[in-house]
Amino acid sequence: MSSIEKSGTYTLGDRTVFRMGYGAMQLAGPGVFGPPHNHEAALAVLRAAVEAGVNHIDTSDFYGPHVTNKLIREALAPYPDDLVIVTKIGARRGEGGSWLPAFTAAELTQAVHDNLRNLGREQLDVVNLRLMFDMSNPAEGSLEEPLSVLAELQQQGLVRHIGLSNVTPTQVAQGRSICPIVCVQNLYNLANRRDDQMIDDLSRDGIAYVPFFPLGGFTPLQSSILSDVAQRLDVTPMQLALAWLLRRSPNILLIPGTSSVSHLHENLAVAQITLSGEVMDELEKITGES
Ligand SMILES: NC(=O)c1ccc[n+]([C@@H]2O[C@H](COP(=O)([O-])OP(=O)(O)OC[C@H]3O[C@@H](n4cnc5c(N)ncnc54)[C@H](OP(=O)(O)O)[C@@H]3O)[C@@H](O)[C@H]2O)c1
């Protein structure tokens, strides 16, 4: 059994994916803005991921913007039948790479069409609505309007499934009262455990939880406990952080980001790592580490 098969599977919408996937954000240029330093190297990472068995890739048309999706298309189209590409909408890039909200009906509709065009697909497998501000606060706008736009695009057949990103439990409940939600993508890792309860609640309801920044994102996880345990197990701290997430809950799907084929292979190998109950207890202490 390959390492990626060992990670197990989960049903995302109506498709089965391996729990170990790949996040494509790191393939754009510095600050997720503009083209990659090395175009061919970026294509190679995507091809290596799919060759190794990855069938769940996370992206957005606002990475670059347009850059990451075009790379995915160039590297992988015609796409393997089992490949699920998850994208997100709700933001746009300003001059210099700033991240701005894009929640009007026209912006959301445009974003879906941009994703379809740049990925070269007739339907988007999963679209996450990425919140940019607190939409459970009436002063900042309601979740109802943008989700209804997305649900309408789903009715038109342009979007297969809908997810939410950067949301609180209240917003998840709100969202689920408007349309079926197949996944939640929030910041979560060994050092950021705010969503512990949400993960367990979603797991009971068969909804995938997809942590972004599983390795700490722009500020890689740093912890003496993580380093010590990793050394003892003869794995890297980053591998240990991913192995912990795989073990944390069966509804967690991993999308670690990398622009390096060697890091990709290190990450895809983590399902081979066995974590004892004692090691899990030790790693629990990281949240409180100063
Ligand atoms: N919904 C949202 O708001 C949101 C926000 C951020 C990200 N995301 C998604 O989540 C995915 C994952 O997040 P992320 O890529 O930002 O952060 P991440 O996966 O936590 O970390 C990526 C960083 O870790 C490094 N890295 C990866 N594998 C490594 C390894 N084995 N050893 C050492 N360093 C390693 C990468 O550098 P190298 O390139 O050098 O390997 C990169 O700097 C993204 O790709 C994106 O699809 C979603």
Image (spheres, helix red, strand yellow):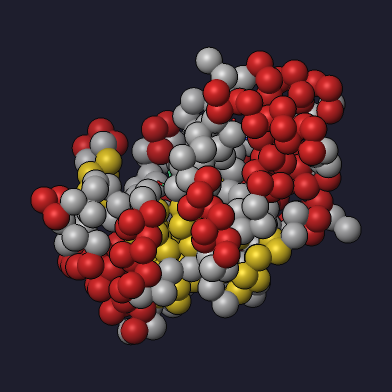
Query: Is residue 248 shown left or right of residue 144?
Result: right
Question: Which image quadrant is residue 35 in?
Answer: top left
**Which residue appears farthest toward the bottom when viewing the image?**
156
Residue toward you, 60 or 20: 20
The residue at 46%/40% (across/down) is: 194
Residue toward you, 266 or 145: 145
Question: Which image quadrant is residue 256 in?
Answer: top right
Residue toward you, 74 or 269: 269
Where in the figure is residue 201, as x and y percent of width and height? 52, 59
**Which residue appears farthest toward the left when viewing the image?**
139
Where in the figure is residue 156, as x and y percent of width and height? 33, 84
The residue at 62%/20% (across/down) is: 223
Residue 285, placed above or below residue 51: above
The residue at 88%/58% (across/down) is: 1
Residue 133, placed above or below residue 215: below
Can you see residue 125?
yes
Where in the figure is residue 155, as x and y percent of width and height? 34, 84
Query: Is residue 206 shown left or right of residue 157?
Result: right
The residue at 36%/78% (across/down) is: 154
Answer with the quadrant where ligand 1 appears in the image. top right
Question: Which image quadrant is residue 237 in?
Answer: top right
Where in the figure is residue 92, as x and y percent of width and height? 26, 49
